[in-house]
Image (cartoon, rainbow, N blue to C red):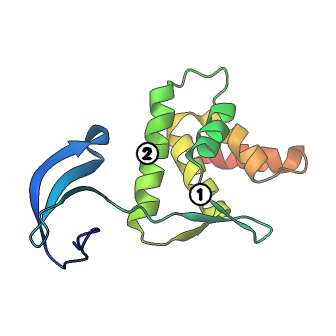
Amino acid sequence: MRCPFCNYYDTKVVDSRPTDEGQAIRRRRECIECSRRFTTYEKTESIPLLIIKKDGNREPYDRNKAIAGILKACEKRPVPLSAIESIVDEIEMDLYNSMDREVTSQHIGEIIMSKLKDLDEVAYVRFASVYRQFKDINTFMEELKKLLEE
């Protein structure tokens, strides 16, 4: 780390402690050349995840949108908020571990539907009806038949 005062190439760490609930490390440093002290912060760099929408536009991933969609599907169902947050946590972990920095909204929708199918079938059908844009009752019935066959 270069000294911000004299631009010398080497410093030593005098003190180190976690900050921001363990999300960063605060380091007090001292320049070996001029003996002046300064503070640096070290934290992990998160690479943003971009969602490719149906129209081709890209936007940053928003956890709140995923939660809102699932909450809407689970409205008036006996599904605890902790289960919904757990689903979103699992999805995020899978997305970030895949190392793909751009993901289609369709892919996320399919993952949500598969998780909802295991959690609550009514919520699954609700989410699928909006996500797959059922045009009429026949498409809706086809999806219900698939669900009953499983």
Element at label 1: helix
Q: Earlier in the sequence, mark 2 or mark 1?
A: 2
At label 2, counting other C-alpha atoms closer than 10 Å, the crowd grade (few under 14, some 14-19, many 20 or more) is few
Question: Which percent across, then down, holds residue 135?
Answer: 89, 51
Q: Name the disc covering residue 108, or none.
A: 1
Q: In this rendering, is residue 141 above or below 76?
A: below
Structural distance between the alpha carbons of marks 2 and 1 = 13 Å
Q: Which residue is mark 2?
A: 89
Front in this rendered view, residue 32 or 25: 32
Front in this rendered view, residue 50 or 74: 50
Quadrant of the image occupied by residue 110: bottom right
Residue occupying image coordinates x 76% and y 72%: 56
Question: Which percent across, then down, holds residue 26?
Answer: 23, 50
Residue occupying image coordinates x 72% and y 64%: 53
- Amino acid type at image mark 2: Asp
Count of marks overlaid on the render: 2
Lateral position of residue 44 relative to residue 95, left or right: left
Q: Name the disc covering residue 132, or none.
A: none
Question: Which percent across, then down, holds residue 132?
Answer: 76, 54
Front in this rendered view, residue 149 or 50: 50
At label 1, counting other C-alpha atoms closer than 10 Å, the crowd grade (few under 14, some 14-19, many 20 or more) is some
Specify the quadrant that holds the N terminus: bottom left
- Amino acid type at image mark 1: Ile
